[in-house]
Image: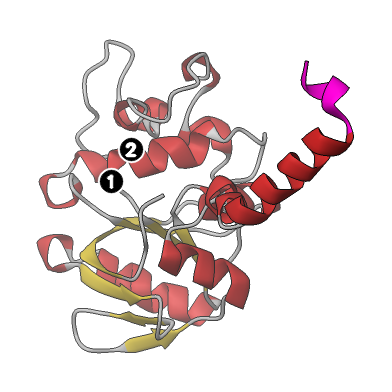
């Protein structure tokens, strides 16, 4: 998993509440078990019309936001079903940080497992960041995970809280497999002892 330390990029505004995982990545795209290739279908029903043409008014189709790396979203982001394809699609599009006042628990947890930083802020701070994000090409925001700060284009700063363990995992680029592999020596030692004590289990 790629490390997350400091991110400076364009922030796209999505002032919609209750964006569920079916809106993030509709069910017809859940057949794949690959984490790549889903970015083009992110927010599919909002990005494209019935003929597959881009809807110009949708934020990620606007020239200023096509390479957005940060998403500033409305309340209760990621609600609905527990599909891990939702963070996969967000990450594959190029977004590594989502900021909102509230996230659905399963989506929130899945973000950390995929190298995405979900940040919870107050309604007042979200309004400030949404205003920053609505500046188009000038909507450049810096997210400093180590300092737990978000800096806007005018130099304003928003602090955020984060569980220390999750923070450390992102800083070191450790998902569940990476955390397990840190115990590689201990695991190997256990397996060797187990094989010596119960060889019939190993054929």
User: Which residue is painted at 47% across and 30% down in the image?
Assistant: 25
Q: Position of residue 52 (x, y in %)?
A: 27, 15
Determine the main secondary structure of the stretch shown in magenta: helix
Depicted 120 relative to depicted 52: above or below: below
Q: Position of residue 136 (x, y in %)?
A: 16, 60
The image quadrant that residue 144 belongs to is bottom left
Range covered by the magenta-colored residues: 198-203
Disc 1 designates what residue? Answer: 94
Q: Is residue 190 left or right of residue 75?
A: right
Q: Position of residue 99 (x, y in %)?
A: 45, 64
Say whether marks 1 and 2 touch (CB < 8 Å).
yes
User: Which residue is painted at 44% across and 37% down in the image?
Assistant: 88
Residue 108 visible in the picture: no
Find the residue positioned furthest to the front: 196
- Front residue (pair 122, 10): 10
Depicted 21 relative to depicted 5: above or below: above
Q: CA distance from mark 1 to mark 2?
A: 5 Å
Query: Element under label 2?
Result: helix
Disc 2 designates what residue? Answer: 92
Depicted 76 relative to depicted 43: above or below: below
- Front residue (pair 194, 64): 194
User: Which residue is painted at 50% across and 37% down in the image?
Assistant: 86
Which image quarter holds the C terminus?
A: top right
User: Which residue is painted at 42% across and 56% down in the image?
Assistant: 15
Q: Residues within 10 Å of mark 2 (few under 14, many from 20)?
A: some
Query: Element under label 1?
Result: loop
Depicted 180 relative to depicted 160: above or below: above
**Residue 111 belongs to the span the image colors magenta:** no
Q: Is residue 68 left or right of residue 14?
A: left
Q: Is residue 142 left or right of residue 84?
A: left
């Amino acid at each position: 998993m790629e490390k997350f330390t400091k991110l400076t990029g364009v922030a796209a505004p999505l002032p919609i509440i209750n964006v569920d995982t079916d809106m993030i990545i509709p069910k017809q795209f859940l057949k794949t078990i690959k984490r790549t290739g889903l970015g083009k279908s992110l927010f599919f029903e909002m990005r494209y019309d019935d003929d597959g043409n881009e809807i110009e008014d949708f934020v990620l189709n606007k020239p200023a936001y096509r390479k957005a790396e940060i998403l500033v979203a409305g309340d209760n982001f990621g609600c609905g079903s527990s599909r891990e394809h939702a963070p996969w699609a967000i990450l594959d599009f190029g977004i590594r940080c989502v900021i909102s006042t509230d996230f659905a628990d399963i989506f929130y947890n899945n973000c950390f497992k995929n190298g995405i930083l979900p940040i919870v802020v107050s309604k007042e701070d979200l309004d400030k960041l949404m205003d920053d994000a609505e500046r188009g090409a000038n909507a450049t925001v810096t997210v400093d995970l180590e300092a737990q700060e978000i800096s806007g284009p005018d130099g304003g700063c928003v602090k955020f809280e984060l569980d220390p363990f999750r923070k450390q995992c992102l800083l070191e680029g450790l998902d569940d497999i990476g955390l397990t592999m840190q115990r590689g020596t201990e695991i190997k030692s256990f397996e060797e002892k187990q094989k010596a004590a119960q060889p019939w289990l190993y054929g």
